């Protein structure tokens, strides 16, 4: 019987098994940030332990870093304290840190692949639920809690219950204006926020093979919102081209040896799954959430549902609460909903390809009066590439704020990176829970294209209403653009 890519990596890293079904897994890369690490480091200090493999441990400041001018002091006391604590802990325990002023600073799930630290066949752990993003490279990546983080720090291992296997097969050609974000929102809408509980989602099929690496990262990133333990995609030639030549990727003979190993990781044709779902993406239109979890989603041309549309009494109660919190009424067209804020950023959709797509849609247009539109690149490297291409000028001329990198409005931890109470935000991030983007903030998850169209029109909008500008009207250096497309595989 064949094995999946997940099983091959799991089996290669399993060190021991307990009678209760838990497996001790070796961890190749441990990523950490300023919010979930302080208690773990304190635990090490109290037990007089060291970080077992500081050379395989990488820290970054991202969650509560302000995205405004970095020559200004950090005014929020909690943010400043957490950043200082990470700086102190990294120095004491010998951990590599990409701090607030590092040229490589950015969101952990963006910069680690950019640097070539995330590679096929590796196990990855990070104190962040969206660590599943790294599965786009054929890595087995787990979001972990603080106590688990301390365990990885001390032992470079992690006790885990082996997840079941779920195949999400995507077929068909995506329509114009439809992106990977729309596809994964549709998948979550279909299977529910608990549909993937206890499973590793493996995305397969012709659609996935055609997708860029950036798009695959979006799929894997949001698998968590469907309840999955993590997600993974078999590595292919696109992944290799994305990684080759990265600053910390293998080189020379080491690269060639790694490529030979990675070729063996692809899921076998006769592999067996515990569950399977198949979706024809040609039927999907741009999606947008109307409620307070990612499954509460409709197509951009559809109407807000009514509690009476749901047979389950518990679901009806959930829908009633969501409608009240979001200030929506059953039967209204979602596209008639006015917006106050548009946020383009997060580890879900803040990569260079996302920013170029937004720039093409807003070129020659202006953000609607009364709308605050903010673009926060996923990394400072992405920011610099966008500026070399002239993308930032297009966005600024259209009325967008152009920020530095950080988690920003997605997690709303830093001052100046929050939605005001009662305001409505179209966001390219991954979570729309109550108060996620600020107290009483109302969040609609959408693709970068839908967010851009909504900023221009001042209401939730179908991006297909806007004709994108040709690339040569948006970028100032076409040779660099084509070189980056080849490198980033978008």
Image: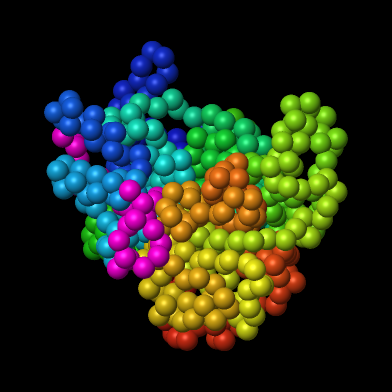
| Residue positioned 17% across, 31% down in the render | 45
In this orientation, does residue 468 appear?
yes
Viewer-nearest residue: 172 or 324:
324
In this orientation, does residue 213 appear?
no
Q: What's the image's color scheme? A: rainbow
485 sits to left or right of 192: left
Total residue callouts: 0
419 sits to left or right of 29: right
205 sits to left or right of 129: right
Viewer-nearest residue: 480 or 85:
85
**Residue 157, image x and y in percent?**
29, 32
| Residue positioned 23% across, 60% down in the render | 253
Asked where in the image residue 379 lies, by quadrant, the reply is bottom left
| Residue positioned 43% across, 61% down in the render | 378
Q: Is residue 131 above or below residue 173?
A: above
**Residue 206, image x and y in percent?**
62, 55
| Residue positioned 43% across, 44% down in the render | 131
Tell whether position 65 is magenta: yes
**Residue 100, image x and y in percent?**
29, 59
The magenta segment is: 50-77
Q: Is residue 33 above or below residue 275?
A: below
């Amino acid at each position: 019987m064949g094995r999946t890519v997940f099983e091959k990596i799991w089996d290669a890293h399993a060190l021991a098994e307990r009678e209760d079904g838990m497996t001790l897994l070796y961890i190749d890369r441990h990523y950490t940030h300023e919010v979930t690490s302080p208690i773990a480091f304190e635990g090490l200090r109290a037990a007089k332990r060291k970080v077992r493999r500081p050379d395989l441990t990488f820290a970054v400041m991202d969650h509560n870093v302000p995205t405004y001018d970095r020559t200004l002091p950090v005014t929020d006391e909690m943010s400043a304290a957490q950043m200082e604590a990470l700086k102190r802990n990294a120095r004491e325990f010998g951990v590599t840190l990409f701090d607030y002023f590092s040229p490589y600073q950015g969101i952990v799930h963006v910069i680690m692949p950019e640097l070539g630290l995330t590679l096929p066949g590796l196990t990855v752990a990070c104190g962040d639920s969206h660590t599943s993003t790294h599965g786009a490279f054929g890595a087995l990546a787990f979001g972990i809690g603080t106590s688990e983080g301390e365990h990885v720090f001390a032992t470079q291992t992690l006790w885990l219950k082996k997840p079941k296997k779920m195949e999400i097969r995507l077929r068909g050609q995506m329509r114009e204006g439809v992106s990977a974000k729309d596809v994964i929102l549709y998948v979550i809408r279909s299977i529910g926020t608990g549909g993937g509980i206890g499973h590793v989602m493996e995305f397969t099929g012709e659609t996935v093979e055609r997708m860029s690496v950036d798009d695959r990262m979006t799929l894997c990133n949001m698998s968590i919102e469907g309840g999955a333990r993590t997600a993974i995609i078999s590595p292919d030639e696109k992944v290799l081209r994305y990684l080759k030549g990265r600053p910390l990727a293998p080189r020379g003979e080491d690269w060639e040896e790694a490529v030979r190993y990675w070729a063996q990781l692809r899921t076998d044709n006769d592999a067996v799954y515990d569950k399977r779902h198949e979706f024809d993406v040609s039927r999907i239109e741009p999606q947008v959430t109307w409620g307070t979890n990612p499954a509460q989603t409709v197509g951009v041309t559809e109407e807000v549902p009514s509690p009476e549309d749901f047979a389950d009494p518990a679901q009806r109660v959930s829908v009633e609460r969501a409608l009240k919190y979001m200030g929506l009424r059953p039967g209204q067209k979602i596209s008639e909903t006015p917006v106050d804020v548009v946020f383009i950023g997060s580890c879900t959709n803040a990569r260079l390809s996302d920013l170029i797509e937004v720039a093409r849609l807003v070129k020659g247009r202006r953000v609607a009066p009364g709308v605050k539109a903010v673009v926060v690149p996923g990394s400072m490297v992405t920011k610099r590439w966008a500026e070399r291409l002239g993308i930032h000028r297009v966005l600024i001329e259209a009325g967008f704020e152009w920020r530095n990198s950080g988690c920003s409005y997605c997690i709303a931890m830093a001052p100046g990176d929050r939605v005001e109470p009662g305001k409505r935000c179209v966001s390219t991030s991954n979570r729309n829970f109550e108060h996620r983007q600020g107290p009483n903030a109302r969040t609609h998850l959408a693709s970068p294209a839908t967010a851009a169209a909504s900023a221009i029109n001042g209401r939730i909008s179908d991006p297909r209403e806007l004709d994108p500008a040709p690339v040569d009207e948006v970028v100032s250096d076409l040779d660099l653009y084509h070189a980056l497309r080849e490198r980033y595989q978008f």
